[in-house]
Image (cartoon, rainbow, N blue to C red):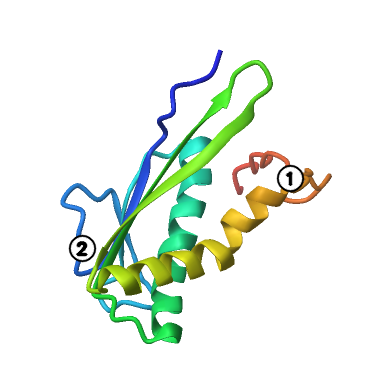
Amino acid sequence: MPIPEENAVTVAAGSLHLEDATIRLPHRWTEGGVEVRTTFTGAHLLHLAVAGCVLNDLFREAEALGVPLDGAEVTATGGFDTATWASTGVDYAVRLSGPSPTDAARLLAAVDAVAEIPRALRQGAPVRRADGLGVTPPATPRAPRA
């Protein structure tokens, strides 16, 4: 039975703001940083990777294309099939402030073609645990000094 298509994450930067942001992070492309609305679960973090990548690429590609971009907001959602834990897919929606409709369409097409995280997910990728890395045995209590 699939989990409902929820696990929504929203990121915003520039002139678009999230009044209920849960975190704010520095951002290479905007002075005010990125505002993030999310919950800390694996599903939300996967969707945050997609939304954050698309947001970054909107600003990067806007600069490269000469498209004026004052602000952007990206929401990513998706679910998981609980029988296999396979993702049912990730959908994202974009809201832009600044570009004309023609420039916005051109920018969105460019970002959809180059955004690295969505491209990697579309291709699929093995995920492996690295044995022995990052495992620290519990600390042994020290005897009191005499």
Total tally of numbered discs in the picture: 2
Q: Name the image quarter holding the N terminus.
A: top right
User: Residue 16 shows which numbered tag?
Assistant: 2
User: Residue 135 shows which numbered tag?
Assistant: 1
Look at the picture and state if 35 lies above or below 139. below
Looking at the rendered structure, the kind of residue marked 1 is Val
Q: Residue at the location (63% across, 57% down)?
A: 119
Foreground of the two, 29 or 70: 70
Residue 114: tell me if it is visible: yes
Q: Where is residue 50 drawn, in percent x and y?
A: 50, 53
Looking at the rendered structure, the kind of residue marked 2 is Leu
Label 2–label 1 contact, CB within 8 A: no
| View extreme (top): residue | 1
Dot 2: what SS? loop
Q: Nearer the viewer, mark 2 or mark 1?
A: 2
Look at the picture and state if 6 lies above or below 28. above
Foreground of the two, 21 or 50: 50
Q: Where is residue 109 drawn, in percent x and y?
A: 48, 65
Residue 98 horizontal side relative to residue 56, left or right: left
Look at the picture and state if 104 lies above or below 89. below
Residue 65 horizontal side relative to residue 82, left or right: left
Look at the picture and state if 113 lies above or below 128. below
Dot 1: what SS? loop
Q: Residue at the location (35% across, 43% down)?
A: 38
Foreground of the two, 85 or 71: 71
Residue 28: tell me if it is visible: no
